[in-house]
Amino acid sequence: KEWLSKGHGEYREIPSERDFFQEVKESKNVVCHFYRDTTFRCQIMDKHLTVLAKKHVETKFLKLNAEKSPFLCERLRIKVIPTLALVKDGKTQDYVVGFTDLGNTDDFTTETLEWRLGCADIINYR
């Protein structure tokens, strides 16, 4: 219940960089998708993250428009879209950059992404 009250269990967009810091502060595990509206692969990532957000309530799943967050993109050295920033205890621990770790294909499965997030210990993956 506490997780759900903090916005876990759903995949949602945050409006600004300022919101990012607030969201990250109040949850132990956060996956943040830096995306661009015009990038087709971001829509593929959205589809998988929507599924995983419902399945892994222990982690908060967010998305942030990279074009509206230049400071954060520079600070986190985000150069490739889509990039997932994996944040644990307020610190960015790992990144999933593009689809390289996911088999380098647009057809990767939700399970592949789940496994990758599990490797980073950002979700409880068995």
Image (tube, rainbow, N blue to C red):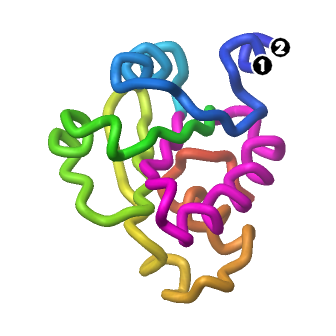
**Contact, CB < 8 Å: mark 1 with mark 2?**
yes
* Residue 116 vs residue 5, the one in the foreground: 5
Asked if the stretch drawn in magenta spans residue 41, the answer is yes
* 26 lies left or right of 75: right
| Residue 51 percent across, percent down from the top left | 80, 53
Quadrant of residue 60 within the rendered picture: top right
Residue found at x 74% / y 11%: 5
Residue found at x 46% / y 53%: 35
Q: Amino acid at mark 2?
A: Lys
Mark 2 burial class by Cα count in 10 Å: few <14, some 14-19, many 20+:
few
Residue found at x 51% / y 14%: 26
Specify the quadrant that holds the N terminus: top right
- Label 1: element kind: helix
Asked if the stretch drawn in magenta spans residue 22, the answer is no
Q: Is residue 66 above or below residue 89?
A: below
Q: Amino acid at mark 1?
A: Leu
Residue assigned mark 2? 1
* Residue 30 vs residue 107, the one in the foreground: 107
* 93 lies left or right of 108: left
Quadrant of residue 83 within the rendered picture: bottom left
Alpha-carbon distance for marks 1 and 2? 5 Å
| Residue 91 percent across, percent down from the top left | 32, 32
* 124 lies left or right of 23: right
| Residue 80 percent across, percent down from the top left | 31, 65
Mark 1 burial class by Cα count in 10 Å: few <14, some 14-19, many 20+:
few
Specify the quadrant that holds the C terminus: bottom right
Residue assigned mark 1? 4
Q: How many marks?
A: 2
Q: Is residue 122 above or below residue 78?
A: above
Magenta stretch in the rendered image? 30-59
Residue found at x 62% / y 62%: 43
- Label 2: element kind: loop
